[in-house]
Image: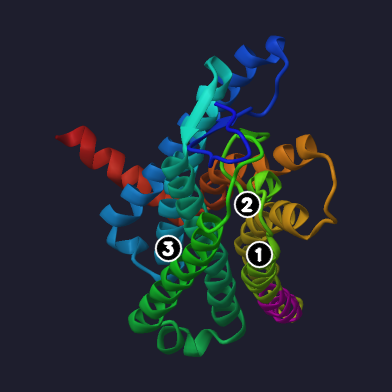
Amino acid sequence: MVPGNDSSVTEFVLLGLTQQPELQLPLFFLFLGIYVVSVVGNLGLVVLIALNPQLHTPMYYFLFNLSFTDLCYSSVITPRMLMSFAKQNVISYAECMAQLFLFAFFVIDECCILTSMAYDRYVAICKPLLYKVTMSCQVCLLLMVGGYVIGFAGAMAHTVCMMKLTFCGGNILNHYMCDIPPLLQLSCTSTSVNELVVFIVVGVNIIVPSLTLLISYTLILSNIFRIRSTRGRSKAFSTCGSHVAAVSLFFGSSAFIYFKPSGGSQDQDKVSTVFYTIVGPMMNPFIYSLRNKDVHVALGKTLQKRMLF
């Protein structure tokens, strides 16, 4: 459907990641595999943490929420993306706005969770004697509830402002999902309010966490270098290194999309978006569990219990 200038768009056609026919099938199986690994990995961590009391600590509480968030927003995006490799991917206006809301909600929530995890590591390494008091159950719950509230508010701001626009210049969306920049390009009314909302919401949810992360890890590194024990220093580096890797992948790729000058290549934007919407959720379970002895022990105990029954 391509409406005329006097009508509003009721559906969008998502062009997908690429229009090259020879790449459709290989990419379909590639991203199907990534999605399956992402679902199994994140769901596995959620179940593992829930079933094992020894993992009921602040660090794993945040990891539980991170895995849940990754599971949700990859499921919001990837199935629709896979459709574009098999057929023309038509999404209704209502479905597009719903996807935009859920995507924004879970991405903002992930920013808050990663920031909370950095604060948790800072307290654990720099203030170990005060850790149980500082990171109490009430504090952890408050941090997570606050993250979900901020995510809901930011998602509502983006979605409501987007719904006030009129799309009458075409319905071909050069993306694999309903993201903000490509939607704004289709609007035939002023997008100045939307751009201001993007600047404020994205700025707050990337710049503030980034500064918090930078300060936290600067203090953490200074404390790590004071540790005399080689084993203790190695353990601290290992614990923080996984978090730094996840943060760099998420914030680096998302900042590239929203803070780069307008008028760049849309294909380049789509590839960059893949890293924090699809690759990131797949990588996080590996980043946080491969070298984590607590997870290995908990997994071994869980498998032994299941084999006995």
Mark 3: few, some, or many residues within 10 Å (few <14, many ≥20)?
many
Q: CA distance from mark 1 to mark 2?
A: 8 Å
Q: Secondary structure at mark 1?
A: helix
Q: Vertical placement of 7 versus 51: above or below?
A: above
Amino acid type, mark 1: Val
Residue extending farthest top = 22
Q: Vertical placement of 140 versus 285: above or below?
A: below
The residue carrying mark 3 is: 60
Mark 1: few, some, or many residues within 10 Å (few <14, many ≥20)?
some
- Asked which colour scheme the image uses, the reply is rainbow
Q: Could you say where residue 216 lies in the image, as x and y percent from the top left?
A: 67, 78
Q: Nearer the viewer, residue 60 or 306?
A: 60
Amino acid type, mark 2: Ile
Q: Quadrant of the N terminus?
A: top right
Q: Are marks 1 and 2 in contact (CB under 8 Å)?
A: yes
What residue is rendered at 68% in x and 34% in y?
Answer: 174
Query: Which stretch did the figure color magenta?
Result: 211-224
- Whether the magenta-drawn stretch holds residue 216 is answered as yes
Tag in front: 3 or 1: 1
Q: Nearer the viewer, residue 237 or 195?
A: 195
The residue carrying mark 2 is: 180
Q: Quadrant of the C terminus?
A: top left
